Image: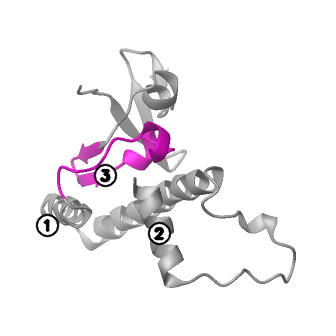
Amino acid sequence: MLQVFTEVFSVHANRWIHVDVCEEAFDQPRLYTEGWGKKIAYCIAFSHDGAADVTRRYVRNPRRHGLPRTKCPEEVLLFIMNDIRAKRREGLSPEDLRRLEKEDREEEKELRTYEIKSMVADGLIEPRSSRKEGEKRPRQSGLSLLMLHDVWRV
């Protein structure tokens, strides 16, 4: 099922905000997954300036609310998003490009935060605050990290 809604960039909040006029919802990106119990594989945002995979904003717990992402390899999706972004930004001034790249970095930071919070909630990683001052993290092998990554992507 295709769900259509809007995101608007708030200069005041310095981030993209979910808006669904049909549901009278503002800044409730988890409405569909946590509210309605929908499972989502992909949530792709298109704008005048590019395209981005914003699934992490809407699916905060991929194990509970995500569907398998099997339409294409993740690397291909990333390539396509970057290609669309580059084409949409052709001819922009260096000033505009810097501003948009800064917005991209901020959005990626926000989306990564959701990813990390989900992994902490699932017990896949421990929060930094749970370690005592000066306490070293136990060593993890590359295989353990690979397994952690694969578990999260399920």
Q: CA distance from mark 3 to mark 2?
A: 24 Å
Amino acid type, label 3: Asp
Q: Is residue 16 visible?
A: no
**Which disc, if any, is residue 147?**
2
Residue 23's place in the image compared with 109, above or below, is: above
Determine the residue positioned at 63% across, 64% down.
Answer: 125
The earlier-in-sequence mark between 3 and 2 is: 3
**Residue 74, percent from left and from top:** 26, 61
Residue at the extreme right? 133
**Which disc, if any, is residue 138?**
none
Q: CA distance from mark 2 to mark 1?
A: 43 Å
Amino acid type, label 2: Met
Q: Secondary structure at mark 1?
A: loop
Q: Is residue 116 left or right of residue 101?
A: right
| Residue 48: in magenta span | yes
The earlier-in-sequence mark between 1 and 3 is: 3
- Name the residue tied to disc 3: 53
**Residue 89, percent from left and from top:** 19, 62
Q: Can you tell which of label 3 and label 2 is closer to the viewer?
A: 2
Q: Is residue 13 left or right of residue 105?
A: right
- Circles 3 and 2: CB atoms closer than 8 Å: no
Determine the residue positioned at 39% across, 27% down.
Answer: 38
Determine the residue positioned at 32% across, 28% down.
Answer: 5
Q: Residue 28 or 64: which is nearer the viewer?
A: 64
**Which disc, if any, is residue 91?**
1
Amino acid type, label 1: Gly
Q: Which residues are magenta?
A: 44-72
